[in-house]
């Protein structure tokens, strides 16, 4: 089986903020920057800064274990995600302001893919190859003075890969990576100077490669993958553990590793359970093909074409494009966990109300914008309206059957009630109605069998299926038609005044009909110049009388 080819490579960056949650707290309280800081959610360490990691801490440790390993650990509460969400949006908007094609894709709060192919190609076109050390990077096509000076005789940051680092100005692929590395450095420095956040960046020709190479030199650094041929790309990917490949997931990696991780009969030796399976071991297995991968992962709900997709990832091939940035999220969800469990309807209802209130507040923050077309002062409009409401729970004990225990979550969905969009109603009141009229009915559909009790460990409420609302974009998608009707008299007034001569001319032309006559409401066929037929007595329009008479003549 031949390896897939990377046709028409584009230039993509993967930007990852270093210990993002911890940095948010450090920027609010700079004294924390020199201390080991851990962000806790419930009794778990959600993340920690590099000072804490140097002392042996890691993500997802229990708070008790973390304090035992590092007694001087400073714990901050990360239950409220609002500061992280707001900061993430600010930083994302910064990158968006430097994008020409609008191709930016956010992954969670702390990671952004950015397709900079157009801006890199433009700067290569403007490049003076005889004076690379005094190059100027253009950040705008319209303003030639907007940009920064850079030395293009070498890469900015670190370089990974087996290709030669000798300057090759005749290679378009080499130049794209070279120029792109300096744009990445400029943006990283600006983020740190303007907002105080350090970041790590990977520069390559597709999303999976940029993410892999970006993890090579953390924190506060960047790495360019200098791999110009398919063979060099495969060599880079081969060295990675299978579970580190983005897009595989631990379950798929486990299945592939157990079947293709050895040269023997496809099974691992008993003493090799902790052996790290590399991409090279799986990719070079004599029995592996896209079809074999597809067969291994087949089953109800399996992804169509998953074999071909994974085969491509094992060779460093990723055809997925960076999605265009949108101000409208695909979904909005609020989640909370309960280690001690919720075992009564009263407790569950109380927590549903809290989560619902947070959801309504988040919807108004993300989806409400000022309405410049409204005559009401400070009016707002919805840029999108979600149509679907989903309730997800996780419960230990007998509620979760053996068939669903691997995922641990069960969900039910329904339509989102219209009262959710009543802007003038108090959020607390809307949350109460949402729980009573929508969420509790969904919860009843998840009710445990007779004789069993509730034991909820997690509640997640999500709204999705966004429908764009009134928009001011140039395409007119979702434009509010009511605004058009309100202004139609002003717009059409110049076209509604015609001279008497023109009116008579229009009346005498067959096929032209005037539906704008102000007095037409009380008119009948008899009052608009129609004539009764002398043969049959029917009322016939004047312009059609001759043709109607001809009909009688032919009939006779």
Image (spheres, rainbow, N blue to C red):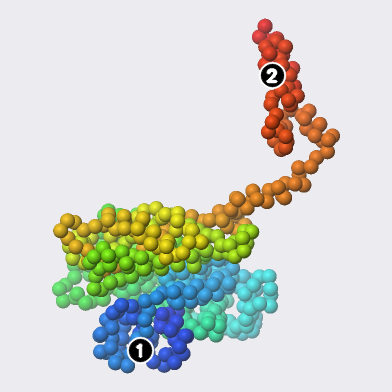
State the residue at coordinates (19%, 75%). Answer: 272
Whether residue 496 can be seen here: yes
Quarter of the image with the C terminus is top right
Where in the figure is residue 534, as x and y percent of width and height? 72, 11
Where in the figure is residue 430, as x and y percent of width and height? 42, 61
When asked about the image quadrant of residue 413, the answer is bottom left
Q: Give the distance between the C-alpha atoms of the residues marked 1 and 2, in whole angstroms.
A: 93 Å
**In the shown orientation, is residue 318 left or right of residue 129?**
left
Label 2: how many Cα within 10 Å (few below 14, some 14–19, many 20+)? some
- As displayed, is residue 359 above or below residue 77? above
- As displayed, is residue 463 above or below residue 270? above
Tally of numbered discs? 2
- As displayed, is residue 119 above or below residue 385? below
Q: Which mark sits nearer the N-terminus, 1 or 2?
A: 1
What residue is disc 1 on?
A: 74
Where in the figure is residue 400, as x and y percent of width and height? 21, 62
State the residue at coordinates (64%, 72%). Answer: 140
Residues 344 and 394: in front is: 344
Asked whether the residues under the numbered discs 1 and 2 touch, taking CB atoms below 8 Å apart as contact, a structural biologist would say no
- As displayed, is residue 50 above or below residue 15? below
SS assignment at label 2: strand
**In the shown orientation, is residue 128 left or right of residue 302?**
right
Residues 27 and 519: in front is: 519
Residues 144 and 271: in front is: 144
Label 1: how many Cα within 10 Å (few below 14, some 14–19, many 20+)? some
SS assignment at label 1: strand
Where in the figure is residue 544, as x and y percent of width and height? 72, 21
Quarter of the image with the N terminus is bottom left
Residue 413's disc number: none
What residue is disc 2 on?
A: 539
Whether residue 290 can be seen here: no
State the residue at coordinates (42%, 80%). Answer: 20
């Amino acid at each position: 089986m031949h390896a897939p080819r990377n046709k028409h490579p584009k230039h993509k960056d993967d930007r990852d903020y270093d210990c993002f949650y911890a940095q948010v707290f450090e920027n609010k309280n700079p004294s924390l920057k020199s201390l080991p800081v851990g962000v806790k959610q419930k009794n778990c360490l959600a993340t920690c800064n590099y000072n804490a990691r140097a002392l042996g801490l890691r993500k997802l440790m229990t708070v008790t274990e973390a304090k035992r390993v590092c007694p001087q650990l400073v714990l901050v509460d990360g239950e409220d995600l609002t500061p992280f969400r707001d900061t993430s949006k600010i930083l994302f908007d910064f990158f968006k302001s430097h994008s020409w094609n609008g191709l930016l894709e956010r992954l969670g709060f702390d990671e952004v893919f950015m397709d900079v192919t157009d801006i890199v190609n433009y700067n290569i076109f403007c490049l003076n190859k005889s004076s690379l050390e005094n190059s100027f990077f253009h950040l705008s096509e319209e303003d030639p003075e907007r940009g920064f000076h850079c030395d293009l005789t070498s890469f900015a940051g670190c370089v990974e890969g087996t290709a030669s680092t000798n300057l090759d100005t005749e290679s378009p692929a080499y130049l794209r990576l070279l120029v792109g590395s300096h744009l990445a450095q400029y943006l990283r420095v600006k983020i740190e100077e303007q907002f105080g956040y350090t970041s790590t960046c990977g520069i390559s020709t597709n999303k999976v490669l940029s993410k892999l190479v970006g993890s090579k030199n953390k924190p506060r650094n960047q790495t360019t993958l200098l791999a110009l041929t398919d063979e060099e790309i495969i060599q880079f990917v081969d060295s990675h553990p299978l579970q580190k490949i983005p897009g595989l997931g631990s379950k798929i990696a486990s299945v592939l590793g157990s079947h293709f991780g050895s040269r023997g009969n496809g099974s691992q030796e008993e003493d090799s359970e902790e052996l790290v399976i590399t991409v090279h071991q799986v990719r070079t297995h004599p029995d592996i093909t896209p079809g074999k991968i597809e067969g291994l992962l087949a089953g109800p709900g399996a992804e169509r074409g998953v074999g071909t997709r994974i085969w491509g990832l094992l060779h460093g091939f990723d055809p997925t494009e960076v999605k265009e940035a949108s101000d409208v999220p695909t979904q909005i969800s609020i989640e909370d966990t309960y280690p001690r469990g919720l075992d009564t309807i009263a407790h569950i209802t109380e927590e549903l109300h809290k989560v619902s209130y947070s959801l309504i507040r988040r919807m108004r923050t993300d989806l409400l914008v000022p309405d410049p077309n409204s005559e009401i002062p400070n009016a707002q409009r919805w840029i999108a309206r979600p149509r679907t409401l989903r309730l997800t729970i996780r419960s230990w004990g007998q509620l979760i059957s053996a068939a669903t225990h691997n995922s641990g979550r069960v969900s039910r969905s329904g339509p989102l009630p219209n009262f959710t969009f009543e802007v003038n109603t108090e959020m607390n009141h809307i949350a109460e109605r949402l729980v009573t009229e929508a969420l509790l009915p969904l919860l009843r559909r998840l009710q445990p069998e007779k004789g069993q009790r509730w034991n909820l460990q997690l509640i997640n409420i999500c709204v999705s299926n966004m429908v764009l609302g009134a928009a001011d974009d140039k395409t007119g998608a979702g434009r509010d038609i009511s605004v058009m009707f309100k202004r139609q008299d002003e717009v059409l007034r110049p076209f509604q005044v015609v001279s008497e001569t023109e009116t008579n001319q229009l009346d005498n032309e067959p096929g032209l009909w005037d539906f704008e006559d102000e007095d037409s409401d009380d008119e009948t066929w008899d009052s608009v110049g129609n004539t009764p037929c002398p043969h049959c007595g029917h009322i016939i329009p004047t312009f059609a009388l001759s043709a109607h008479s001809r009909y009688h003549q032919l009939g006779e």
